[in-house]
Image (cartoon, rainbow, N blue to C red):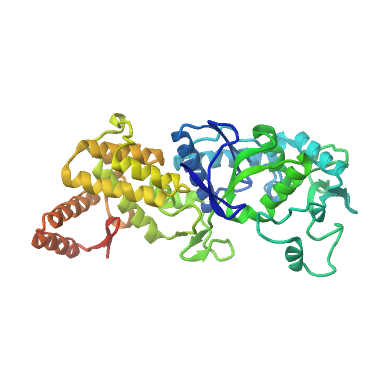
Amino acid sequence: MLTIHNSFRRSKEVFYPIEPGRVGVYVCGMTVYDYCHLGHARVMVVFDMVVRWLRMCGYEVCYVRNITDIDDKIIRRAQENGESIRALTDRFIAAMHEDADALGVLRPDFEPRATDYVTDMQSLISKLEEKGLAYVAANGDVCYAVRRFPDYGRLSGKTVDELRAGERVGIVGDKNDPLDFVLWKQAKADEPEEAKWDSPWGRGRPGWHIECSAMSSRLLGRHFDIHGGGQDLQFPHHENEIAQSEGAHGSRFVNYWMHNGFVRVDDEKMSKSLGNFSTIRDVLGKYDPEIVRFFMLRTHYRGPLNYSDKHLDDARQALARLYNAVKAVPPRETPEINWSSIWGERFRAAMDEDFNTVEALAVLFDLAGEANRSGDIELAGQIRALAQVLGLLFREADEFLQSGTENGVSGLDVNGIEARIAARAAARTARNFAEADRLRAELLAEGIVLEDGSHGTCWRRV
């Protein structure tokens, strides 16, 4: 039985879809004014994994991931470049698709652009205004009156007074309350005409938060199953979505809220100011995309992901072990998954426990160890079949193994190293410790250090 950690209640809950057999999933996507970074990559890979598993469980999934194609940063970047907003956003949407495709991320069923749903946004704002939850501020912007929504702060676990305590006393500006947020922005004279729409409140454009409320409502209905996104969106973006959607419709918005953890770089928060900001393209220039995907799945989606070259190198070695274990089974001969086997049962149990890819991958390494010891091709086939549920091991083994050149280690060298590691594992199983020690020493003489762990043996070059 599938359980999901629901951010709204801060606990794991058994998953029950609103409509039996069908699941609606909405994930906040990218603001397309630049290339996607590692944080975007994690969102894409995590929820691709979630959707793949839901479909594996037999659900008919409607997956929506939006695109923000109008906001201050987009307008500013287009003006700096001397190009139209549409030209800028089209270019970076194409780049986003290239990055996602490389990472093995399946396209969502719907990928709505905000600019195509402005009418829906205006309708939603009008409903909020009718219910006394929205007002026109002194500068012409339409704002949401946060204190008029009793449940504001439940997702983030903060009361309105706690949130208000962080504001500077006396600084209100054009809003009635510093916590109030913008639903509709009055047009500015220096903004291009393509960034302005007619509305009951004058020419302008929507605020960021209202976009997702309008698009999810149109494509999934007023009440749907799963809403996801990065942990950084929990407040204020998702909190504001709840206030808008439930305030307008008077009904529950989402049943399960899912948030993936932050990306850190060498144990520091990733940011441009620290100079450790990496785009997906930066990383794919050094590492095979499947290595990056595998690396992201080795950490539970809710935990922080620490990016470093060392961790990517380790991921490459670990993925090579799996590919070595399935060399006898070409991708086209991948069998059906035997869910009644001990391996299938363990894998399903791991994934049903809040999408625990860490334990699911541990199953694959245990299975690889058994397949290597026994030479059982059926076990090798199960490795491929189970890995493909996670979007891995779709390639010919030699294609992957001969493609890596990181840190001066060629693909052919990797084959030789992994073969001797497998021989050492077999020697240890046979209690031939002298042979196992000889192989370790032989590798060490070549600058290869072995590190034995619970998921097998890793190696690194010194």
Above or below: residue 97 compared with residue 355? above
Q: Position of residue 114 (x, y in %)?
A: 69, 39
Question: Which residue of the protein is positioned furthest toward the right in this rendering?
Answer: 138
370 and 20: which is toward the camera: 20
Q: Is residue 399 visible?
A: no
Drawn side of residue 316 relative to residue 432, left or right: right
Answer with the quarter of the image where residue 91 lies. Answer: top right
Residue 339 is situated, as x and y percent measured from the top left of the image, at 34, 36
For image coordinates 44% across by 44% down, the residue present is 352
In which quadrant of the rendered image does the C terminus lie?
bottom left
Q: Look at the picture and state if 115 lies above or below 41.
A: above
> Which sits in the foreground, 186 or 22?
22
Q: Residue at x 45, y 43 (%)?
A: 103
Q: Which residue is at 58% across, 61% downward?
A: 272
Does residue 39 appear in this view?
yes
Residue 66 position in % (x across, y down): 63, 40
Q: Position of residue 23 (x, y in %)?
A: 56, 35
